[in-house]
Amino acid sequence: MTGWLRIVGLGPGAGRLVTPEAQAVLDQATDAVGYIPYVARLPDRDGLVKHASDNRVELDRAAHALTLAAQGRRVAVVSSGDPGVFAMASAVFEAVETGPPAWRALDIEVLPGITAMLAAAARAGAPLGHDFCAINLSDNLKPWALIERRLRLAAEADFAMAFYNPRSAARPEGFARTLAILRETCADARPVIFARAVSTPDESLRVVPLPDATAGMADMRTVVLIGSSRTRLIRRDGRPPIVYTPRFAG
Ligand code: SAH
């Protein structure tokens, strides 16, 4: 049996947002490797071995997946959203770069998925319709000072922004600091979108002006989008507002 490794994005949650290409790989895999809640999204079936692991062991998980593929298994490493956005694809390639030379000969492919910020943006309208950037607010893998520097420079450059991993029980204060920096650097009432569990039964979407945004509005299942100075709100009777960023700037 010839092994392979596919790094698969499962999308934001709904089954209909898994790409047909990703689904075909999931149907052929002998092994699924990933963080516990993502592996749990795969239905059990004969011939599929699930290897679920905790959040902070990405490199070990990547090495395990590569070892299985080298043994001839058909391995799907699964991430939520897109596997290249704050997820497993980089961890696998880091393991390949530093691991046994034989891993470089393996058949490895990355299969894209719909990342949280795009699913959230689509729900709200088109807040990322002009230039934007994405920032991971977790300081597990980088110092807080770097996050703060990027926030300030992105605000100064007038990007719309998407924030992943805004807040967790282990880091309760980081998102409050983020909002304080944004209020300081933006000094206007641009919309902030709190999009939680998009495309799942728990989905909620909340749009508030920056001065009214509070840290408690986000948790680890939330992606937070903030507009640029150009972002507009279209109010509608009895329906949520549409948030969009025009495609011109000046
Ligand atoms: N690879 C993933 C991101 C992993 S980081 C992707 O491309 O989407 C985990 C963070 O993603 C969460 O803390 C949250 O900010 C965001 N996220 C993932 N799924 C989400 C969803 N369905 N709704 C809102 N945010 C989500």
Image: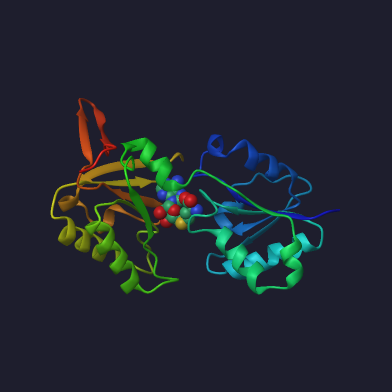
Query: In the image as oriented, which residue stretches furthest toward the front?
Result: 250
Please provide percent x and percent y for residue 6. 67, 52
* 31 to 174, vertically: above or below: above
Task: Look at 75% across and 62% down and name the residue there.
Answer: 105
- Say if residue 172 shows up in the picture: no
Residue 122 shown left or right of residue 46 in the figure: left
Would residue 203 be found to the left or right of residue 127 on screen? right
Q: Is residue 63 left or right of residue 35?
A: right
The residue sitting at the top extreme is: 237
Relative to 205, say whether 85 is above or below.
below
- Where residue 108 appears, as percent x and y from the top left, is 69, 55
Decide which of 156, 4 is in the foreground and name it.
156
* Residue situated furthest right in the rendering: 1
Q: Relative to 216, does residue 64 appear above or below in the rendering?
A: below
Q: How many marks?
A: 0
Q: Which sits in the foreground, 220 or 90?
A: 90
- Residue found at the far left of this picture: 187
Instruction: List x then y, in percent, for residue 229.
Output: 19, 47
Q: Is residue 146 shown left or right of residue 111?
A: left
Q: Position of residue 69 (x, y in %)?
A: 76, 60
Q: Quadrant of residue 150?
A: bottom left
Please indicate, yes or no, whether residue 26 appears anywhere in the rendered image: yes
Question: Which quadrant holds the C terminus?
Answer: top left
The one of 112 and 39 positioned closer to us in this rendering: 112
Report which quarter residue 92 is drawn in.
bottom right
Residue 167 lies in quadrant: bottom left
Q: What colouring method underlies this structural image?
A: rainbow
Image point 25% across, 63% down: which residue?
152
